[in-house]
Amino acid sequence: MNMTSNRPYLLRALNEWILDNHLTPYLLVNAEADGVEVPGGYADNGKVVLNISPAAVKGITISNEAVNFNARFGGVSCFINIPVLAILAIYAKENGMGMIFPDETPDRNKESVAHQAGVKSHLKVIK
């Protein structure tokens, strides 16, 4: 029996957990994945880190398909769309606690050593 991805459920739960602990939730996103809509110039090595705290975004929705919200980049309001499969990690800025997800985007070298090194370089303390 095929089941739906658990990633959106984990994202919602971890986001709530981070916020309930009065910390700042960050997403590490594969900026090169299909469907990702983030402003250009903010990605580093194909990845972008986004603050999704209520103080930083407006109208956030974490659905089973995507995370959507409005945020300001360089003073300009932007609509952000991130398919859940493009999210590589969610973690608290202050202590790195959270979860790393495997890269499940189509046509990617899943679980490659290079990918894992790239994620871990962004998350110094995550456990």
Image (tube, rainbow, N blue to C red):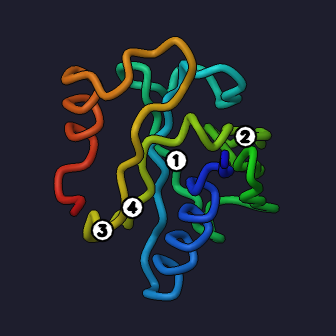
Q: CA distance from mark 1 to mark 4?
A: 10 Å
Q: CA distance from mark 1 to mark 2?
A: 10 Å
Q: Which residue is mark 3?
A: 97
Where is the C terminus found, in terms of image quarters?
bottom left
Q: Which callout, 2 or 3, points to the residue nearer the camera?
A: 3
Q: Which residue is mark 4?
A: 91
Please, what is the three-letter code of the amino acid marked with disc 2? Ile
- Left/right placement of residue 80 relative to residue 40 reads right
The earlier-in-sequence mark between 2 and 3 is 2
Badge 2: residue crowd in 10 Å (few <14, some 14–19, many ≥20):
some
Q: Which residue is mark 1?
A: 50
The earlier-in-sequence mark between 3 and 4 is 4
Q: Nearer the viewer, residue 9 or 16?
A: 9
Q: Nearer the viewer, residue 74 or 29?
A: 29
Q: Position of residue 107 (x, y in %)?
A: 52, 12
Please, what is the three-letter code of the amino acid marked with disc 3? Met
Q: CA distance from mark 3 to mark 1?
A: 15 Å
Q: Which mark is residue 73?
A: none
Badge 1: residue crowd in 10 Å (few <14, some 14–19, many ≥20):
some
Identify the residue at image location x=75%, y=45%.
65
Q: Secondary structure at mark 3?
A: loop
Q: Quadrant of the rendered structure where residue 115 is?
A: top left
Q: CA distance from mark 3 to mark 4?
A: 5 Å
Q: Pointers 2 and 3 in contact (CB under 8 A)?
A: no
Q: Position of residue 94 (x, y in %)?
A: 30, 70
